[in-house]
Amino acid sequence: MIPALGSLHTGRLVLTTVDPLQAVAQPTIVGLLTELGLVGPRRDAVASFDAGPALGALVGFTGCAVQFDGAGAPEATHGPWLHVPPATMEPRLRWGRNTRPPRCPTCSAALHAWREHLPAPEPGADDPRGLCCDADLPLRCDTCGSAQPTHRWRWGRHAGAGRSFVLIEEVFPGEARPLSALLQALEQLGAGTWDYFYVQD
Ligand SMILES: [Zn+2]
């Protein structure tokens, strides 16, 4: 459900593996991000964290939509924070109001009616943030008729699929991106290269 105007979600930067079938155990990701200084104190029992002191060295901010006090001082109660949900058994697609029509993996045509074709969103109890659904379910192309798993469609940087995610709140789409030091460190976890996209609830 789209929130009322005035309380619109700014957006989140989402990192995941390029291969949506790969996964890294959540504690392994959290351990790495803690070591790097990207995450600080845990905010709740689920898996939310204050941003750590190295946020500015690992994520490049180009806009002014994100403000943080003292480079992510632990005592800050606002500013960027991170969520690292547990890895799922199957890939999940995450999308939002900023998502644009995906392109067919077979013929490259854009599917404008993707919202009607997409399976109903089903956020998990342990991961209530944003819209997501099973990315193994097929999405049928209006143009060539082929039905390919949702995760094989090309979503650009406006949605994405994976089993392991790092969510960085609140980031307006395009106003922050992971720097190479962060992407290289994530690649060392053995699930291949990582990429990123943006979602606005
Ligand atoms: Zn097609």
Image (cartoon, helix red, strand yellow):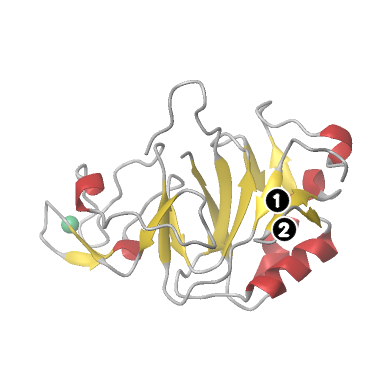
Considering depth in this image, is 100 or 81 the residue closer to the camera? 81
Q: Position of residue 152 (x, y in %)?
A: 33, 64
* Neighbourhood count class around disc 2 (C-alpha, 10 Å): few under 14, some 14–19, many 20 upward: some
Q: Quadrant location of the N terminus? A: top left
Q: Amino acid at mark 2?
A: Leu
Considering depth in this image, is 151 or 96 the residue closer to the camera? 96
C-alpha span from label 1 to label 2: 6 Å
Residue 74 relative to residue 26: left or right: right
Q: Position of residue 171 (x, y in %)?
A: 61, 38
Residue 37 relative to residue 140: left or right: right
Whether residue 56 is visible to the viewer of this picture, yes or no, is yes
Q: Position of residue 38 (x, y in %)?
A: 78, 54
Residue 179 tag number:
1
Mark 2 vs ligand 1: CB below 8 Å: no
Asked whether the residues under the numbered discs 1 and 2 touch, taking CB atoms below 8 Å apart as contact, a structural biologist would say yes
- The residue at 12%/52% (across/down) is 142
Whether residue 188 is visible to the viewer of this picture, yes or no, is no
- The residue at 77%/49% (across/down) is 50
Quadrant hosting residue 96: top left
- The residue at 89%/36% (across/down) is 70
Residue extending farthest top: 6
Considering depth in this image, is 82 or 122 the residue closer to the camera? 122
Residue 92 tag number:
none
Q: Amino acid at mark 1?
A: Leu
**Quarter containing ligand 1?**
bottom left
Q: Position of residue 147 (x, y in %)?
A: 18, 65
Task: Return the residue at label 2.
Answer: 182
Tell me the element at label 1.
loop
Q: Is residue 39 above or below residue 149?
A: above
Q: Is residue 130 above or below residue 144?
A: above
